[in-house]
Image (cartoon, helix red, strand yellow):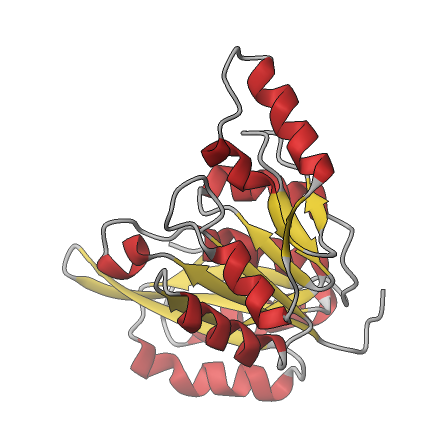
Amino acid sequence: MSDERIWTAAVLVIGDEILSGRTQDKNVAQIATWLDVQGIRLREVRIVPDVEDEIVAALNAIRARYDYVFTTGGIGPTHDDITVDAVAKALGVGVIIHPAARAILERYYNARGIELTDARLRMARVPEGADLIPNRMSGAPGIRLGNLFIMAGVPHITAGMLDALTGELEGGAPLVAHTIGAWSPESEVADLLRQGEKDHPGVAIGSYPFFRDGRVGANFVIRSTDGDAVAACVAMLTAGLEALGYAVTDGGI
């Protein structure tokens, strides 16, 4: 793994149900967290409907900019599961029934006494040249084509696919993060946060305000690939906040 290069990724969330608000996306957060551990930074997220041309356009735009692209959603057995077709179109390849995917589905459904219908067999369709990502949850595998990863829309299934990919991607140093919190308005500590980043190159400080029980506070997340730099910045911010009269809660409020 290289500690110098910053490896990047994008997520393309596919589904009318996300855009309608009927379903709340959870995959972006878990993919972002997983990527941090792999030493890869999530740089962009796009959400598109179940429309082939829009999926193709979005995929082509982001795959040219980032090292890795993850798609979520649209790989099930129904008519609106068109991600595989859209990806194949974007890449200029055909769609095939992957023999290993078919065998996996046959074993999965036969063990449960369920027929492998044409609809269920749709989950064995992949863009030509693709490899499979194991799926321990429901049998139907995810799909990998180079640096493109086609994942399920169901969060716990995607989590299993990510687990199968752990350690398989090339990345840089994992991101270290530490959170502290204080009952302080952001406006009163803005200069301290700015100085914290200035004095600790390579460290990023995120400020996340909240309002609870009639009080204003904020949590501060200090991130870097250098654990010592994170610790030094946390110590500096803690001392600065306490000097301003704000008690600090390690781990956040």
- Residue 56 relative to residue 188: left or right: right
- Residue 46 relative to residue 148: left or right: left
Q: Nearer the viewer, residue 126 or 72?
A: 126
Give percent across and percent down for residue 24.
Answer: 31, 51
Q: Nearer the viewer, residue 198 or 155?
A: 155
Give percent across and percent down for residue 25.
Answer: 37, 53
Whether residue 104 is situated above or below residue 38 in the rendered picture: above
Instruction: Write the residue at 39% across / 76% down.
Output: 244
- State the residue lying farthest toward the left: 214
Numbered-mark total: 0
Give percent across and percent down for residue 55.
Answer: 45, 68
Q: Quadrant of residue 110?
A: top right
Residue 235 seen by the camera: no
Give percent across and percent down for residue 197.
Answer: 57, 83
Whether residue 162 is situated above or below residue 181 in the rendered picture: above
- State the residue lying farthest toward the right: 1
Q: Nearer the viewer, residue 242 or 61?
A: 61
Q: Nearer the viewer, residue 199 or 76?
A: 76
- Residue 218 relative to residue 41: left or right: left
Residue 90 seen by the camera: yes
Instruction: Write the residue at 38% across / 80% down.
Output: 189
Q: Quadrant of the C terminus?
A: bottom left
Q: Quadrant of the N terminus?
A: bottom right
Instruction: Write the residue at 79% across / 63% down.
Output: 170
